[in-house]
Amino acid sequence: MKANVRVDVSGGAIADPAERLRCYVTFPCLDFQVPQLTRTTSAELIWTSKGASRFKYVAGVFAFRGNETAGTIINPDVLPNLVNSDTGVITHSYAAFAEGAYDLLDSLALTVGGRYSHDRKKGTVIANRVTAATPIPGPDAGWGSFTPRYKLDPSSNLYFTYSKGFKSGVINPVIVLPGSSTEALVAAPESLDAFEVGFKKGAHRLSLAASAFYYQYKDIQVQNFSGLTILTSNAAKASIYGIDVDATWNVSDEFSLRAAGSWLPKAKYNDFDGAIYYVPPLSASGLTTYSESVAGKRLLRTPKITANLTGHYKRSTQAGAFDATVSVYYTSRSPLELGYRVYAKAHEQINATFGFTSDESRFSVAFFANNITNKAFVQGLVPTAAADMAVYNPPRQVGFTLKYGY
């Protein structure tokens, strides 16, 4: 993947070369370029058991290599030495995993599995591609983790699961200003202990699944805008507990309703010192910056309630099958920054699709409409000392897809 982003913060292109030169030199506007390049290679090999024996297993190995580079160029035509840097991160990741399930009795099964992962990331920095194009070695960090999983299923309806999760550490690329340090920041891996108990019940017309869960996070990764780029760091601990419910009602052979939802009464930082946030009023030097503990406060972007209701209709004919789906999604409000002054408001969204698939499945056409009511809401935020940079959801989208197989 390759992307090149150019931003003219003056509000528009300047056609006259002399005027453009004056604007760049006196800094009312900037030509800000962020060229990005990502190359990845991955491979996976999986073994699975055969037959219907009491013991079943799956095992495999995985390998990944990634090379990410991000440049920063400001006013290249006028002042090429101002900021003209490159930062890169090379990632090597290896994993081996296995899981086995044994039917102790006809109504009792035990599942045990695990995954060992090892990641190594190495950073490089080119302070200035014009005056010093030789890469400077950056930090070199590696992490290993074993993540077990245990599941006890005393019947076809009840289960208990314990699992451990691992999210790789991060080497932050930095924008290199003249005379500044080329040392990048390293964020530690994030780990998760997950406990879940639940049940599943299925019948011809009605199926129901419900679970209660408790998550413990350690070194949870958070992002903050440094003034030039977004950096990842670690909060200490966080915890979440809640309930998931999922039900499907087959009203008829052609029409079904599905309802699902989650309730998270508690989702908080247990320990998080040094959280950075910004508070008005706005002055010539920007918003006031605070750094303090937010222990006991709610996790960002974690709404208490999420729910969706979906209706699906399918009718088969001699020519093929017609199907239609309408979905309504709801999300309660949630905080977007650590000062807890900006929230994503509660909102709902309606999507719909209508399609036809030929009898031999060689041809299909589908029409879709997303965000039918064209509601706007903030789904992401990058808080800075100068402004809150909000990311809005996509507006109403209408289109169609055609598929033909041969």
Image: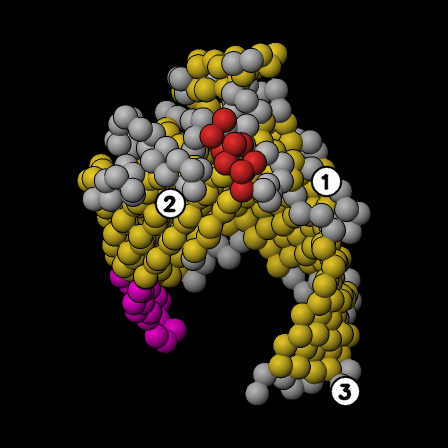
Give the image location of residue 16, x and y in percent.
58, 42
Question: Which residue shows up at 40% across the image and 17% down it?
Answer: 274
Give the residue pinned by disc 3.
Answer: 318
Query: Does 108 sit above or below residue 51?
Result: above
Q: Closest to the observer: 261 or 24?
A: 24
Image depth: mark 1 or mark 3 in front: 1
Q: Is residue 57 magenta?
A: yes
Tell me, yes or no, if residue 173 can be seen here: no
- Outermost front residue: 18
Question: Which residue shows up at 72% across the image and 63% down it?
Answer: 399
Judged left or right of residue 98, residue 322 is: right
Under circle 3, the secondary element is: loop
Numbered tag placed on residue 376 in the rendering? 1
Q: Give the residues in magenta.
A: 42-61
Tell me, yes or no, if residue 326 can be seen here: yes
* Quadrant placement of the C terminus: bottom right
Judged left or right of residue 250, residue 261 is: left
